Amino acid sequence: MTSRVEPLHDLRLERRALRAERDRVSWWRRVVRARMDLAVASAATPGPLGEQVAFALPLDVCLQVPRAGDLRDVLPPAVSGHELGLLPELRDLDARLAAYAEGVEGALTNATSRLVERLADDPAAVLRGSTAAG
């Protein structure tokens, strides 16, 4: 039993807000990690594709492989190297976002547990649409 009966409406709003925040932080983590990938890729020189596995591929697949020169033409290396200089900051930002995401996930788990406990204490509250303590 809970020591404090929280209105279902409030619990649902809390969970909705926490789920939205979890989605936002997840999106920003993907953006930061993609930026790290781009920073590393900006310093990489495209190498040959398909040479080590040509024997295992059908001929029509082998004929489609882009040459290293094709990749270099479209993906030239970075001139300034500025992108690579951002890696420490991007890694730090990703670690901070990960810690925040863990906290949001913990709060969401806690809110979900409180909602389940509230519903277990008073299943009829769902049918009543009650927002007041029972």
Image: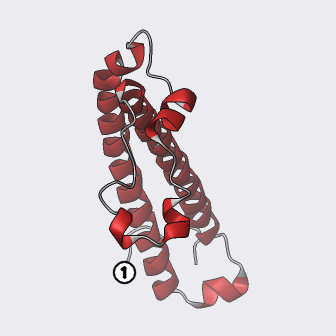
Colour scheme shown: secondary structure
Query: Looking at the rendering, which quadrant does residue 111 occupy?
Result: bottom left
Question: From the viewer's perspective, is 13 left or right of 47?
Answer: right
Task: Choose between 97 and 105: the one closer to the eye.
Answer: 97
State the residue in front, 74 or 36: 74
- Which quarter of the image is occupied by the C terminus? bottom right
> What's the residue type where badge 1 is placed?
Met
Report the label total: 1
Residue 7: x, y in percent?
58, 68
In the image, 9: left or right of 106? right
**Residue 79 seen in render:** yes
What is the secondary structure assignment of the residue under circle 1?
Answer: loop
Quick one: which residue is furthest to the top in this view? 80
Look at the picture and state if 35 lies above or below 10: above
Residue 104, position as x, y percentages in the image: 41, 51
Among the 4 quarters of the image, the one containing residue 32: top left
Q: Quadrant of the N terminus?
A: bottom left
Q: Residue at x 50, y 36 (%)?
A: 71
User: Residue under circle 1?
Assistant: 1
Task: Name above or below for residue 129 compared with residue 80.
Answer: below
* Mark 1 neighbour density, 10 Å: few (under 14) some (14–19) many (20 or more): few
Q: Is residue 6 visible?
A: no
Above/below status of 47 relative to 59: above
- The residue that appears at 32% across and 35% down in the rendered structure is 96
Residues 5 and 98: in front is 98
Estimate the x, y position of residue 52 in percent, counting from the top left. Answer: 29, 57
Compared with 79, 118 (above or below) is below
Residue at x-position 34% and y-position 44%: 98
Q: In this orientation, which residue lies closer to the viewer: 117 or 79?
A: 79
Indicate the position of residue 68 as horizontal and vertical percent values: 44, 38
